[in-house]
Image (cartoon, grey):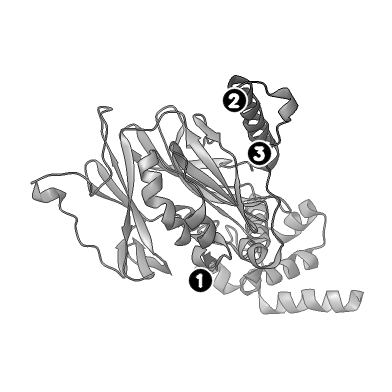
Amino acid sequence: MVTTLDLTGLTTGPSQVWNAIRLVPLIRDEPVEDLRLSSRLYGEVGGLVKVGPRSGYVSYIPHGFVATWTDDGTPAAAYGTQLSTDPDWLPTTMGLRFHRGMARRQAKDRLRFLPMHLSLEGYLALHFSGPALVWEQWSQQAIRRGLSPRAEEAYVGADVRGLADALRVFEIHPSQCGVMVYVADALATAFVVPHPDDYRALHPTLLLDLYGELIHHYANLLPPVPDFRARIADSDVRSLAQLRSAVDEQEDQWRHFHDSTMAAALGEQVNSVYRMGRFALSRFLPSFRPGLENHIGEAITDDSGAITYLKTFRLSNNQVRRGYLLDRLASNDWHLADTAAELGIGEAQLGLRLESAGFGHLLRQDVLDGYRKQRRVRR
C-alpha cells in the first residue's frame, strides 16, 4: 500500500530558539482520544532485534512505545495509567537484550513497537538482496549474500549540542501534540503523538532518539540561529481587541513562513505495516533526491489518513547517496553500463562511486582494479 502523509488537524505555533536549536510546537485542534502512546524504558541501550527465524540485527534500543487503542471510539488511557485488578493488565517483563520483532502485539488492543526501527529497517533492507541478474561485474559475495552486512551510524540526542537544554527550558503549549526540531534551521526530526498528555510524557524521549551525522555536525559547528520575534507597531493598537488581532496576524505570518518555506516534504512512499483497529502503523522512505532533504520515518494514521503518530529521521548526504545509487541500480536491473548512462557518467565512474559509498565489495576485484586504472590513466 502506498499513500501520502496528511498533517490535517495540526498547526504550527511560534518557535523557540536555544543557540542552534529551534523547536516548533505542533498543536492539535482536537486530541485523539481513542489512541494513546506511552514509553517503555529499557535498562540498557544495546539490544538484538530478531526479525526472522534466522535473522536479526544489533542496534541502539533505549525505549519502546506502547500504543493502546479502542475499537468503539471511546477514550483510551496511556498504558500503565489504568486502575485494574485484572492480572493481564500487569506490565509484562521484556528482555533487555533480546527483542522479538520491531512491532509486537501484547494484547488485542495494545502494540509494543521500537520507535524508528521500522523505518531504519526499511532503509537498511533497501534492495538488500543485491543484484537481481548475475552480470559479470558483480562479485560472488554480491550474488550470494547481497548487501549483507549493512550498517549505518547515528548519534543519540543527548550528544546533539544544545538539545537537552532546549527541551528542558522551553515552554510546552497546553494543546501541544508534537514538535519539529530544527538544528541550524535544518529539520532534524518531526515528532507527533495523539494526545497532549502523551506529548508531555514522551517529550524527554527526544534525547534518546537517533539523529544523523549532518544534524550532529550542525549543532556543534554552526552559530546560533535568529529568533523570529513578533513586532507590533504600538501606534496601531488602541484596545485589547486590536492587540489580540495584531498577535493573531503575527502568528499567522509565522505559520505561513514555516509551512511554506521551512517545513520539508515528508512521506513520499508510505507502506502499511500493522493494523490497529481504525489505525495503521506505517513506515516511509524518500525518493532519495541528492542535495535535498530526505527523511525516513514511521507513522500511525487513522481511517481518514490523518496523522496520529509521526517520527522522522533525516538522512545524511552519504546515506542519501547510497540510497540513490541502490535505487538507480535496481531500476536498471543492476546493469552497470545502463545505470551509468542514465546518470550521464562512465561505467568506471559509477564503479568508483559505488566503492566510495561503501559498496566496493559488491564488485569483482579485477573489475574494480580496472576502474581504478582507468581513473589513473585519465589523470
Which tag, 1 or 3, sits closer to the chain's start? 1
Q: Determine contact: label 1, label 2, CB under 8 Å.
A: no
Which tag, 3 or 2, sits closer to the chain's start? 2
Frontmost residue, 328 versus 357: 357
Task: Name the kind of residue labelled 1 in the image.
Answer: Pro
Task: Name the kind of residue labelled 3 in the image.
Answer: His
Quickly name the residue at label 1: 149
Task: Name the kind of residue labelled 2 in the image.
Answer: Arg
Frontmost residue, 35 versus 132: 35
Name the residue furthest right: 379
Residue 33 lies in quadrant: top left
Quickly name the residue at label 2: 244
Q: Residue 299: x percent and y percent?
A: 45, 43
Quickly name the residue at label 3: 258
In this rendering, the label closer to the viewer, 1 or 3: 3
Quarter that holds the C terminus: bottom right
- Depicted 373 relative to depicted 265: above or below: below
In this rendering, the label closer to the viewer, 3 or 2: 2
